[in-house]
Image (spheres, helix red, strand yellow):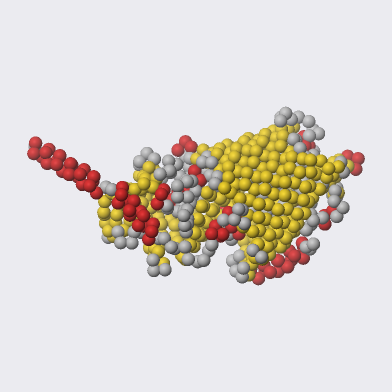
Amino acid sequence: MITSASLSFAIALLLAQSAFAGEVQGTLSSRLDFYPDHADGTASEGRSAEVKIDVFHDLDESRVVGEFIARGDEKDSGRRITEARQAYFRTPLAGFDVFVGNRQEFWGKAESKNVVDVINQSDAAANEGKSDKLGAPSISAERYLGIGDLQLWYISSFREKTFNDSEAHPSSGLPVSSAQYARKEGKDADDFAARLSSFVGDWDLAGSVFYGTARDPILSVASGGRALNPYYALQKSIGLEAQYTGDVTLLKWESLHGTQSSLLGAHDFAAAVAGIEYTFYGPFETMWDIGLIVEIQHDDRPQAAANQFGVAGVRLVFNDIADSNILFLASADRKADQSVVSLEASRRISDVTSVKLTSQFYNARTTTSTFGQLSDDDAVTLTLNMFF
Amino acid sequence: MKLAAASMFVAVASACLATAAFASPEKGLEIAIEADSRDKGFGDSTAQITMILMDKYGQSTERAIRNRTFEGDNEGDKSLVIFDSPGDVRGTAFLSHTKKADSDDQWLYLPALKRVKRIASSNKAGPFMGSEFSYEDIASQEVEKYTYNYLRDEKLNGLDCFVIEYDPVDPKSGYKRQIVWMDTTEYRVHKIDFYDRKDALLKTLNYENYNQYLGKFWRSNRLVMINHQTGKKTELVFADWKLQTGMTERDFEKSALKRTR
């Protein structure tokens, strides 16, 4: 069992000596949120700021890497965090690259949802659950085997998903109570995972296994309707990933099959995303790339907002000096009872600044559905990033 | 008058004959193979690159990138490009496995997500980082990617040069043809005129400040690309060229993208 805090501190000390060697980089992000549909008693706007420090230092064949976050938020305590998203020591050992400490890793191929991306917990409160992650306290090893890359993971303690405050957005409006676990060791239970990834010609393929605590909790209303109770099940699963890269067409598949053990017993589940992305390069005599994205999501776990979602979107890349791009995605469940529309646009302002505009608009026919509870959480967010 | 017309006819006819006599696909291919073989054995190379993008009003912006190349044996070269600035793309890395005949295999590493993404290589005519260089301009040049036609000998900046037409084999290339000036002693490229699909002159690339490394391999330290149709210009200034550094093929696998910093 790694004591995450003490390890992070040791790594921070190791890294401190590199502070003068040009191995330190920082990002300062300030962010404004507007909630045009907010319910009475909830925030109409929000302000937050985040500092991210990236640092590394080489010691012969080994490397120490740190990615530290401090985020403040005017109103939403759920978004406040100090976090060693990465703080690890990497060294070659017995033909493997061995990593010890907090690490972030991405698995998956799809655009709208990554069901096989099981290593890290989501820092969901930070950014609508999109891409921010919490570091996984772990020992991991990687090796190139000729047929592909093998990863072995031991994750020594569990990180709980972050939630926004009940008056903040997005939120069901109920405070989230302390977590309960299917595994008796609770947060201290160990997780294990392995993945083999490879490519053959136009195909990128990967297979993975996972035994551990499910990252997404099952949420139930507790305390006589005054709180949400997160319950973390035990998950045993197999993940499969494939991407075909054609001239202008990408075909994507990822799926997760397994069992989830909770208070209700052990249940088999399947979650999958299948997608196609078709890109027009330089249409209409422009330098633009226009990508059309269609994905179908299936997830029969109780954590999912609905069993099936269809997603359609457009990615517009302007290929200009400012790297301007826009991503528009619309998702709806099969009966169109719930839907969400999101837009992301970003561009560089100067060598050291960039700006990003994101927005989400939720729609639901019933207030009891997941998106129904998020109906006052429509958001427009403006983020200014400064790099130093 | 008749005499003038007749002598004009003779002059035109002999000019056509002269072109027919000297323009030679065989000689073009021979020169391309010789140029390629003279660069064989560099093993691997690294360089720091400053990319200077200038608009038609002379406003400029800079990017810092690092380049690593691994010489291919049976297949084409493998190359890794790492972005150091501007800040928003810092740490992004681009890996390309060049193929002699097929489309190249390409991956992009996105540091914020720690995600390695396979990307389609058919956007070869698209601009690289918003510059006047397209993906195919920065890709490793393999003999098999063009057919050739030697046109003539010509002096360029006092150097005796072959002038050769390169016709891209791939229909997805942004070019109908390229006219290449290569010196006759060291087989170094000094200038390329790029013609777009409509056969209009699109861009000119000049190679400057050649240095020789390990007593054999020539590398240019300044590439200037001018787009005649937009008036924009991109310069690549190379520093710290190193060859045969001892990198291995392992450093150019897709898993290596995650540890490029």
Q: Residue at x 59, y 40 (%)?
A: A251
Residue occupying the far right of the picture: A224
Q: Residue A76 appears at what percent x and percent y?
A: 77, 49
All told, the count of numbered labels is 0
Q: Residue A9 appears at what percent x and percent y?
A: 74, 66
Q: Residue B224 appears at what percent x and percent y?
A: 40, 55
Q: Residue B163 appears at what percent x and percent y?
A: 30, 52
Q: Is residue B87 visible?
A: no
Q: Is residue A93 above or below residue A157?
A: below
For the residue pair A61 and A345, the one nearer the viewer reads as: A61
Q: Is residue A292 visible?
A: yes
Q: Quadrant of residue B188?
A: bottom left
Q: Residue at x 77, y 40 (%)?
A: A269
Left or right of A100 in this view: B177: left
Q: Residue at x 58, y 45 (%)?
A: A203
Locate the N terminus of chain A by quadrant.
bottom right
Left or right of A304 in this view: A328: left
For the residue pair B12 and B193, the one nearer the viewer reads as: B12
